[in-house]
Image: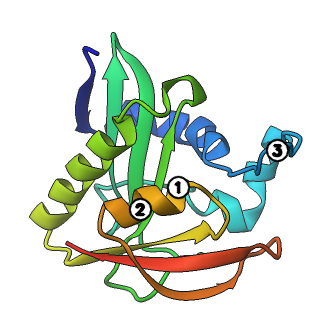
Amino acid sequence: MNIRTRVIEPADYPQLEDFLYHAIYLPPGTPSVPRELIFDPEIYIYVKDFDPATRPGDCGVVAERDGKLLGIAWTRIIPAYGHIDDETPKLAISVLPECRGQGLGTVLMERLFDELRAQGYTRTSLSVQKDNPAVRFYRRLGYETAGDRLDHAGHEDWLMVKQL
């Protein structure tokens, strides 16, 4: 596949908005949502002022081929869905639609877990809609359900935690 993973760099930060949009889960048959949705403060917090050099918990890795980003996995300690405390980074991951189902997400996540361990983190959390097929992916990676709640749009979500 000739794909390289690396730690996110400042030149990659502007692309976080595009990947945030691609991370929005839409059940089959649901029409696409306008890109402007990412600027809702409850969503935009996932990328706003992202900077691993100055913000504890900000950490990210990218997958690229021939200089094109194919996926990003990142964490933040932010008051958003999936937040459990100020010592546990909350995870987000996004892979371009045409690159899904090829193992890229697993490669990104494993690299991100290594980076988080190197920074001294012992766990990570996330929030995922209960009907999102990604739940199986997260469980395969060792995430366990820690609770449930409604998200900002009224969807039933799982709060999941992985011990690193």
Q: Quadrant of residue 57?
A: bottom left
What amino acid type should be assigned to the residue bearing mark 3? Glu
Does residue 73 appear anywhere in the picture?
Answer: yes
Give the secondary structure at mark 3. Answer: helix
Residue 138: numbered disc:
2
In the rendered view, does 1 fall on the left or right side of 44? left
Q: Quadrant of residue 127?
A: bottom right
Extreme residue toward the top, this view: 66
In the rendered view, does 112 fall on the left or right side of 118? right
Residue under the point 80% across and 50% down = 37
Q: Horizontal and vertical percent for residue 139?
A: 39, 66
Q: Nearer the viewer, mark 3 or mark 1?
A: 1
With respect to residue 111, does 46 lie above or below? below
What amino acid type should be assigned to the residue bearing mark 1? Ala
Residue 36: numbered disc:
3
In-front residue for pair 11/147: 147
In the rendered view, does 125 fall on the left or right side of 112? right
Query: Sequence order check: which comes first, mark 2 or mark 3?
Result: 3
With respect to residue 113, does 93 lie above or below? above
Name the residue beneath numbered marker 1: 134
In-front residue for pair 112/26: 26
Residue under the point 82% across and 44% down = 36
The Cα atoms of the two marked residues, 3 and 1, are separated by 24 Å
Residue under the point 36% across and 35% down = 104
Q: Horizontal and vertical percent for residue 125?
A: 41, 74
Q: Horizontal and vertical percent for residue 77?
A: 42, 73
Q: Are marks 2 and 3 in contact (CB under 8 Å)?
A: no
Q: Nearer the viewer, mark 2 or mark 3?
A: 2
Q: Quadrant of residue 62?
A: top left
Does residue 79 appear anywhere in the picture?
Answer: no
Q: Residues within 10 Å of mark 1 (few under 14, many from 20)?
A: few
